[in-house]
Amino acid sequence: MKPRNATAKNQIRVGADIGGTFTDLVMLRSDGNYSVQKVPSTVEDFSRGIVEGLDAFLSDNRLTSELVSEIIHGTTVATNAILQNQGARTALVTTRGFRDVLEFRRLRFPDLFS
């Protein structure tokens, strides 16, 4: 797998997935090699888990942060909050003509792409 935006030698792209328990990182080097890092998620500030995992990777490999060209972020924290019925109470307000938004939420439609 070749990085799509690699222009500099030794460039690193980072993918991070923040979960409720762990933050997983994948570091892809410009030569196609990759490394993974798993660190505990930091609930009080989820970004800290990414920073700590990236710092550990860079330190272990004697690399500098200047080599990081891109960080791609994903999370399951919101999904987990919904599934566990945690988080703030919310409401959805729509305007005329967007009634089907609630149907999409309930996944009640005959053809996904019509």
Image (cartoon, helix red, strand yellow):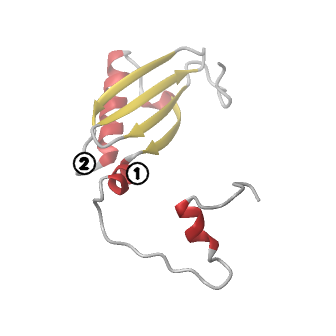
Q: Position of residue 79 (x, y in %)?
A: 40, 51
In the displayed structure, does residue 69 sit left or right of residue 114? left
Residue shown at 36% from the left, 24% from the top: 37
* Residue beneath the point at 64% across and 25% down: 3
Quarter of the rendering occupied by the C terminus: bottom right
- The secondary element bearing badge 1 is classed as helix
Tell me if mark 1 has few (under 14), some (14-19) or many (20+) residues whose alpha carbon lies within 10 angstroms of its own: few
**Residue 109 to residue 62: above or below:** below
Quick one: which residue is furthest to the right in this view? 114
Residue projecting furthest to the left: 44
Residue 43 drawn at (x, y percent): 24, 48
Task: Give the residue pinned by disc 2.
Answer: 43
* Viewer-side residue, 9 vs 27: 27
Q: Position of residue 45 (x, y in %)?
A: 27, 50
Q: Position of residue 72 (x, y in %)?
A: 52, 40
107 to the left or right of 54: right
**Which amino acid is tagged 1?**
Thr
**What residue is rendered at 30% in x and 53% in y?**
84
Say if 49 sits above or below 45 in the image: above
Secondary structure under the numbered disc 2 in the rendered image: loop
Left or right position of 4 against 36: right
**What amino acid type should be assigned to the residue bearing mark 2?**
Val
Residue lying farthest bottom? 96
Q: Depth check: give the residue in front, 99 or 73.
A: 99
Distance (Cα) linking label 1 and label 2: 15 Å
Mark 2: give few (<14), some (14-19) or many (20+) Cα within 10 Å.
some
Write down the residue under mark 1: 79
Q: Earlier in the sequence, mark 1 or mark 2?
A: 2
Residue at x 54%, y 63% (from the top left corner): 105
